């Protein structure tokens, strides 16, 4: 019985010392960033840090609501290849960006306030986009292709 207990303790201590990163870290914390689904494009909408009282920035695609982003949040849209009309809304104005995606690509858009009453969408590099996704929190969106 004592040998069994010793073997069980040894096995538990070895498994606790094993250096295996979490599935989230494997996906977002390394070079193996998630790729687009087969036949689709991955479009990440990200927002950098913002003051705690900053309002959410609503986003729509072809006049349909997609969701909203607060500070340090992001959402991923898996899109079939097509052009899309994306809009970010401020308190009284909106900014439009026409986006065309192709299968297999991963792209990043920064959603940020512009002035006091508008919001804008701007392209991010792969490096900056991945950095903001890793640092932020994923939020759900309303879009379902």
Image (cartoon, rainbow, N blue to C red):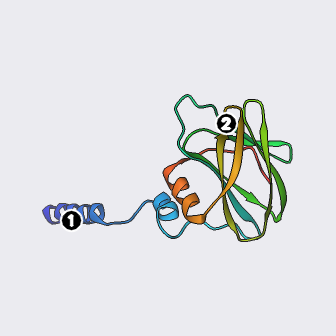
Under tag 1, what secondary structure?
helix
* Gap in angstroms between the C-alphas marked 1 and 2: 61 Å
Instruction: Tell me the quarter of the picture where residue 63 sits.
Output: top right
Q: Residue at horizontal 43%, vertical 59%?
A: 22
Query: For residue 93, what is the image quadrant?
Result: top right
Q: Position of residue 104 (x, y in %)?
A: 71, 71
**Residue at point 61%, 63% (across, down):** 125
Q: Height in image: 85 above or below 71? A: below
Q: Nearer the viewer, residue 41 or 1?
A: 41
Please rate how many residues cluster around mark 1, counting C-alpha atoms within 10 Å: few if below 14, some from 14 to 19, many from 20.
Answer: few
Q: Quadrant of the image for the N terminus?
A: bottom left
Which residue carries the number 1 mark?
Answer: 10
Give coordinates of residue 18: x percent, y percent.
Answer: 31, 66
User: Does 33 sit left or right of 60 as displayed?
Assistant: left
Residue 126 image point, x, y percent? 59, 65
Residue 87: name its quadrant: top right
Query: Label 2 belongs to which residue?
Result: 115
Residue at image location 71% in from the left, 45% down from the top? 120
């Amino acid at each position: 019985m004592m040998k069994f207990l010793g073997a069980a303790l040894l096995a538990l201590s070895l498994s606790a010392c094993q250096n295996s990163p979490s599935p989230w870290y494997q996906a977002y914390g390394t070079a193996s960033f998630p790729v687009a689904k087969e036949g689709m494009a991955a479009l990440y909408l990200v927002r950098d840090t913002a003051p705690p009282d900053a309002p959410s920035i609503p986003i729509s695609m072809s006049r349909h609501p997609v969701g909203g982003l607060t500070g340090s949040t992001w959402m991923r849209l898996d899109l079939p290849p097509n052009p899309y009309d994306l809009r970010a809304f401020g308190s009284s104005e909106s900014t439009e960006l026409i986006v065309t995606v192709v299968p297999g690509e991963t792209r990043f858009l920064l959603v940020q306030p512009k002035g006091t009453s508008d919001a804008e969408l701007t392209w991010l590099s792969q490096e900056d986009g991945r950095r903001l996704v890793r640092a932020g929190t994923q939020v759900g969106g309303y879009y379902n292709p």
